[in-house]
Image (tube, helix red, strand yellow):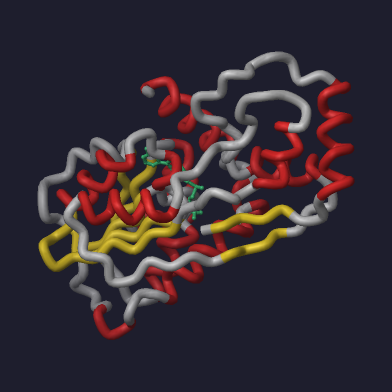
Amino acid sequence: MLNNLKFVKKSFSAAVPHYDNFALLQQITSDLLISLIPIEVVNDRLICADLGAGTGYTSEKLSKLKIKNLTMIDLSQKMLSQCKNKFENQFLYLNADVNQLGIKDNTFDLICSNLMIQWSDNLDKTLSEINRVLKEQGTFFFSTLLPGSLIELDKSWKSVEQGDHINQFLPFDNLKKSILENNFQIQSLTKKEIKLEFNNPLEAMKSLKYVGANFVKNRQNKGLCTANKLTKMFDFYSRNFKKIIWLN
Ligand SMILES: C[S@@+](CC[C@H](N)C(=O)[O-])C[C@H]1O[C@@H](n2cnc3c(N)ncnc32)[C@H](O)[C@@H]1O
């Protein structure tokens, strides 16, 4: 588990130079997430956090809603350094794992997290930690990925060999159960299909790599990725799919 965290951190850190040019999905879901925040509840006294802030797209949008006190939190120091270069003293920065924030109880009025919680190895622990640092009347806005995301790549790889080349995501009902079990009240939990088009699987895989999302948790099949396997995978993909679908 510790290993997964180390590799998640390494993948995202390596993606920093390209991230903003390839993070189209992340920008779409961030815009959707921000649009859910009722403007009337936002004021400049709110204490807020952006969990898994990445290069700061969501934080920047939050600041445009007049949020003044915002802490950007990320596992990757390189992501945060990029943010510090961009935003300087506009925000606070915390390099921490979401499962161990080291922040006192009841700190935040509002926590936003765009496409981060699916990287957690222990969703219950993550939600319980978020609940702990959220004030009694606080609100947590998040987006995540659901099963069916990247199914085209998943099926194409599985036509070549067993094991996961693509991360598996928690089903919607399990996610809902975990949220309720960790003492949140759900105001709204919705699914939306977002389609991104790639000309071929290589483009899709490159895009995953350049946003740091290429690390496959608990991957068993660590054998060589030979030209023969890749050709077979491409062939299956081009016979069966035109688009890559993300669900969140
Ligand atoms: C897909 S990126 C999303 C970044 C940003 N929210 C956005 O929408 O562009 C996920 C981010 O979560 C961070 N992250 C992953 N696991 C984390 C953890 N356990 N604790 C804190 N941050 C984590 C990564 O370093 C990365 O910056």
Please tell me which residue is depicted at 27% across the width and 66% down the height of the picture.
186
Q: Where is residue 84 in the image (x, y as percent from the top left)?
A: 42, 49
- How far from the left and from the top, in percent, is residue 8? 48, 32
Quarter-of-image position of residue 97: top left
Looking at the image, residue 61 lies above or below residue 203 = below
Front residue of 148/55: it is: 148
> Could you say which quadrant of the image residue 3 lies in?
top left
Residue at 27% of width from left, 42% of height from top?
Answer: 124
- Ligand 1, what quadrant? top left
**Relative to 34, does residue 167 appear above or below in the rendering?**
above
Who is closer to the viewer here, 19 or 158? 158
Q: Which residue lies furthest to the top in this view?
A: 223
- Quadrant showing the N terminus: top left
Q: Which residue is drawn at 55% across and 32% down?
A: 11
As drawn, is 186 to the left or to the right of 17? left
- Give x and y (percent) for residue 123: 33, 42
User: Does residue 193 appear to the left or right of 125 in the view shown?
Assistant: right
Q: Residue furthest bottom?
A: 40
Q: Position of residue 60 (x, y in %)?
A: 44, 65
Name the residue located 38 percent from the left edge and 34 percent from the top edge: 121
